[in-house]
Image (cartoon, rainbow, N blue to C red):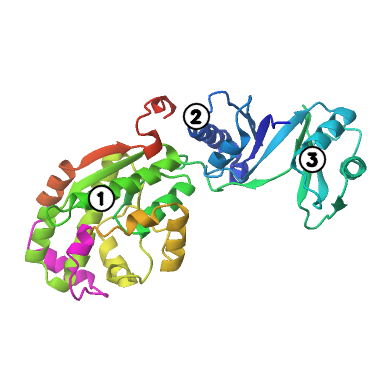
Amino acid sequence: MMYDRILVRYGEISTKGRNRNKFIDRLRKNIKRALSNYPNVAIKAERDRMFILLNGEDSDGIGEKLKEIFGIQSFSPALKVEKDLDKMKDAALELFRKIHKPGQTFKITAKRSDKTFELDTNGINSEFGGHILRNVDDLKVDVRNPDINLQIEIRKEAAYISAETIKGAGGLPAASAGKGMLMLSGGIDSPVAGYLSMKRGLEVEGVHFFSPPFTSERAKQKVIDLSEKLAEVNGHFALHIVPFTEIQQAIHKQIPENYTMTTTRRIMLRITDAIREKQGGLAIITGESLGQVASQTLESMYAINEVTSTPIIRPLITMDKLQIMDIAQDIDTHDISIRPYEDCCTVFVPSSPKTKPKLDKVQNFESFFDFEELVQKAVEGTERMVLKPASERKDDSMDDLF
């Protein structure tokens, strides 16, 4: 017996009140994009549940896709059965025999939202448990830690029978909560920050600072490859590549060495903020982790943040490096990030950067040179590219989903 549908549970979306339908519609579109290679699938969205009608498609392959989609708390491959007790018992037994292995334990978990059904939850548990035990050899009940949890849900329109609950990615549907600009280096941290921001529903665009000839085309390609990984969340990812050589050269001529990192970060933030405004973003996202490097001390953040009033989101701020690396491994960006091609911050890092820079000092140093013209030139010279996951690079048929 093949499953005929997958029940998708919303999780956090269920708390959204009047705005719930907007989040559900966004999730439906994200699922439709992710399942584009399964043309027979149909998606039916309801207020408290979503049904993916398989129409003969592979439930296992679709399940692997669903695990990665933000906004899904859990899902269950299931059978829809008429609310006739004999038909339900036959379907439950057939499904159980398909998945059961000798020596395994089981239990029945009933849920009855249709209170008019002839049995209550205890009655369903007893009736179906007894039916399974009478017809399957070498089987025991274990209500605490069963090998198989046969779930029977009675709703108004039908009964649904499933045997597993698969954990989803959680969070909110990608691109459901506004746009933010991610300061994307080639390192480990910033792609993780972008991923976690997407998990909270943000549409994320990357801003990368490129300083040829001091940084190579291979360093640029590394960032493009990271962007393609992030594109897997939402089907596309916009990357802005900022020409930064002239500004970095000016900084190193005009600013005392131990303050060059502070000024560099301040100007990067100014440029990112200008790009954010042009693109209609509402926040800036960084991969900063408190105290990890000189520019990420509280004193440095205070001095750097002064150039903008735009909200700055720091998803990694309390994480240590090992936690961040674990997530990078999970989302498959780690091995790209550790490629030995340096970005502009690494190439130009001073030997003794100021860990507790003073705002008044950095403002004084910057006052002797007008960076504004160079900032505007960099913003105007920024290259914007829209990237897709590598697997979809040649497939333009998805454009109508966005």
Distance Cα–Cα, label 1 vs label 2? 32 Å
Which label sits in the foreground, 1 or 3? Answer: 3
Q: Earlier in the sequence, mark 3 or mark 2?
A: 2
At 47% from the left and 44% from the top, the residue drawn is 201
Residue at 71% x, 44% y is 164
Decide which of 105, 265 is in the foreground and name it.
105
Residue 314 included in the magenta stretch of the image = no
Q: Is residue 367 above or below residue 30?
A: below
- Residue 281 place in picture, x, y as percent: 34, 43
Q: Is residue 293 above or below residue 389?
A: below
Local crowd at mark 2 within 10 Å, few (<14), some, or many (≥20)? Answer: few
Which range of residues does the magenta coloring cover? 343-372
- Number of residues whose C-alpha sits closer than 10 Å to that of mark 3, classed few (under 14), some (14–19) or many (20 or more): many
Q: Are marks 1 and 3 in contact (CB under 8 Å)?
A: no
Q: Secondary structure at mark 1?
A: strand
Q: Is residue 273 visible?
A: no
Quadrant, the C terminus: top left
Residue 175: x and y, percent? 44, 40
Q: Tags 3 and 2 in contact by the CB under 8 Å rule?
A: no
Q: As shown in the figure, which amino acid type bears the numbered disc 2?
A: Asn
Give SS at disc 3.
Answer: helix
At label 1, the amino acid type is: His
User: Earlier along the polypeptide chain: callout 1 or callout 3?
Assistant: 3
* Residue where numbered disc 3 is placed: 96
**Between discs 1 and 2, the one toward the N terminus:** 2
Magenta stretch containing residue 345, yes or no?
yes
Q: Quadrant of residue 389?
A: top left
Residue type indicated by callout 3? Phe
Q: Report the Cα–Cα distance between label 1 and label 3.
A: 53 Å
Instruction: Determine which quarter of the picture holds residue 399.
Output: top left
Task: Pick whichever, 62 or 154, lies toward us.
Answer: 62
Which residue was labeled with disc 2? 37
